[in-house]
Image: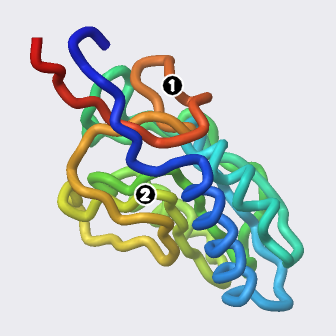
Amino acid sequence: MENKKEVVLFSREEIAKRVKELGREITEHYKGEEVIVIPVLRGGFVFAADLIRELEIPVVVDFAITSSYESREESSGQVNIISDIREDIENKHVLIVDDIMDSGHTLKNLKEIFGHRNPKTLDVCVLLDKPSRRQVELKPDFKGFEIEDVFIVGYGLNYGKNYRNIPYIFSWEDIDV
């Protein structure tokens, strides 16, 4: 971005450390049980891949594909489920994993849809929680970091079609010209 400089909010090392801690918390929470982990694509795939490798419990993985941002910096508030899960989640432990909880619309929508399928438990884990932007009553059961209202990219978070591959999370600030 022209006339902007990158500001790293969470380094690769900070993210790895927190993901490892979350893995221990989630393993303890589901101790001795199998859990179906449902990453929300596309943003949640990087975080979910790292998180799943930290879990020391039986894990089944399925995916939900949603869209609410398109190429905007803010959620449209409209949640489109592009591809639903294939696993039967009735009477099973389910953990929805996403990159960020911002307005909360996507995760609230998914919790309602999956809740009608009668899982034993239905929890939400996000790497980033932005409660100042919440438009619905919902809190994550597990979260990596709480952040202020700033636009961020990297580590699975995108702007347009770019930046998901950056191994850390950053924002931009204006450069005085």
Q: What is the secondary structure assignment of the residue under circle 1?
A: loop
Q: Quadrant of residue 27?
A: bottom right
Q: Quadrant of residue 78?
A: top left
Labels 2 & 1 near each other (Cβ < 8 A): no
Furthest residue toward left: 177
Q: Amino acid at mark 2?
A: Leu
The residue depicted at 71 percent of the width and 80 percent of the height is 24
Q: Quadrant of residue 93?
A: bottom right
Which is nearer the eye, 109 or 3?
3
Location of mark 1 (residue): 163
In this rendering, the answer to whether 95 lies above or below 128 is below
Q: What is the secondary structure assignment of the residue under circle 2?
A: strand
Which is nearer the eye, 125 or 167?
167
- Marks 2 and 1 sit apart, C-alpha to C-alpha, by 16 Å
Dot 2 alpha-carbon crowd within 10 angstroms: few under 14, some 14 to 19, many 20 or more? some
Dot 1 alpha-carbon crowd within 10 angstroms: few under 14, some 14 to 19, many 20 or more? some
In this rendering, the answer to whether 52 lies above or below 154 is below
Horizontal side, residue 126 vs residue 74: left or right: right
Q: Quadrant of the N terminus?
A: top left
Q: Position of residue 139 (x, y in %)?
A: 36, 73
Q: Position of residue 142 (x, y in %)?
A: 51, 74
Q: Position of residue 129 (x, y in %)?
A: 37, 61
Which label was assigned to residue 128? 2
In this rendering, the answer to whether 29 lies above or below 65 is below
Q: Position of residue 42 (x, y in %)?
A: 58, 35
The residue depicted at 69 percent of the width and 68 percent of the height is 20
The residue depicted at 43 percent of the width and 71 percent of the height is 140
The total of numbered circles placed on residues is: 2
Q: Quadrant of the C terminus?
A: top left
Q: Amino acid at mark 1?
A: Tyr
Horizontal side, residue 21 vs residue 34: left or right: left
In this rendering, the answer to whether 159 lies above or below 9 is above
